[in-house]
Image: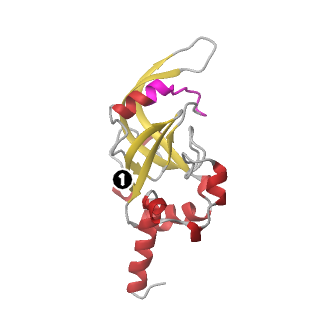
Amino acid sequence: DHVVLGPLSKNGYRYPVATQEAAVKAKIFEGAKAYLNHPSAKEMGDARDVRDLIGEHKNVRLNGEKTYSDLFLVNNRTVQDHVLPIAESAPHLIGSSVVIRGKMKKVEGDLPEIEAIYACRSIDLVSEPATTNGLYESEKTEKVEEDMELKDLTLEQLRTRPDLIEAILAGAKEKEKGVE
């Protein structure tokens, strides 16, 4: 599980809890496609390249002031060559970022507020996320994340990490083929 939207954006917007909660209840983020990187400014509005598709967001929920999801990765070259190596070695370098349509209201003396989210085009994996702090920023405290060792991982905990399950299965398939 990881954060897809937090209360304050580095791009200068606020996402109040009520706005996030309404979007979660309306299932606006549920099933959102995940791509590697945002589209360029000139590509905005165009169909996304299927080669950049890396997964789908499911089980979207609000916890505290942040919106979380489970990212179910697809097994393609982009994921194998780019996403998994970074996720395994340096997950703090990447994070999720939403591409949404919404209603903004100006707040005098403060950052503009997104008061409604109408649609989510995608929740992309990027190197400069605006409202998250890395790929595995989770609902648990950082201390719990740091103290956990792979040997202590339970089946129940593994079920919450579809990305690890997919990586294990991909590794097993490669081993069966004699590729290591």
Secondary structure character of the magenta stretch overall: loop
**First to last magenta residue range:** 10-20
What x and y, as percent, mark residue 131? Answer: 56, 38
Q: Nearer the viewer, residue 70 or 124?
A: 70
Q: Nearer the viewer, residue 157 or 19?
A: 157
Q: Nearer the viewer, residue 44 or 35?
A: 35
Vertical arrangement, residue 161 with respect to residue 37, above or below: below
Local SS, label 1:
loop
Vertical arrangement, residue 160 with respect to residue 61, above or below: below
In magenta stretch: residue 17: yes
* Residue ID at (66%, 57%): 146
Q: Quadrant of residue 24?
A: top left
Vertical arrangement, residue 129 with respect to residue 54, above or below: above
Tell me the colour scheme of the image. secondary structure
Q: Quadrant of residue 168?
A: bottom left
- Left or right relative to 86: residue 67: left
What x and y, as percent, mark residue 14? Answer: 55, 26
* Residue ID at (42%, 29%): 21
Q: Residue furthest top?
A: 108
Q: Which residue is mark 1?
A: 49
Q: Residue furthest bottom?
A: 178
Q: Amino acid at mark 1?
A: Asp
What x and y, as percent, mark residue 79? Answer: 44, 63
Count of numbered circles on the image: 1
- Left or right relative to 88: residue 47: left
* Residue ID at (36%, 44%): 32
Mark 1 nearby-residue class (10 Å; few <14, some 14–19, many ≥20) = few
In magenta stretch: residue 71: no
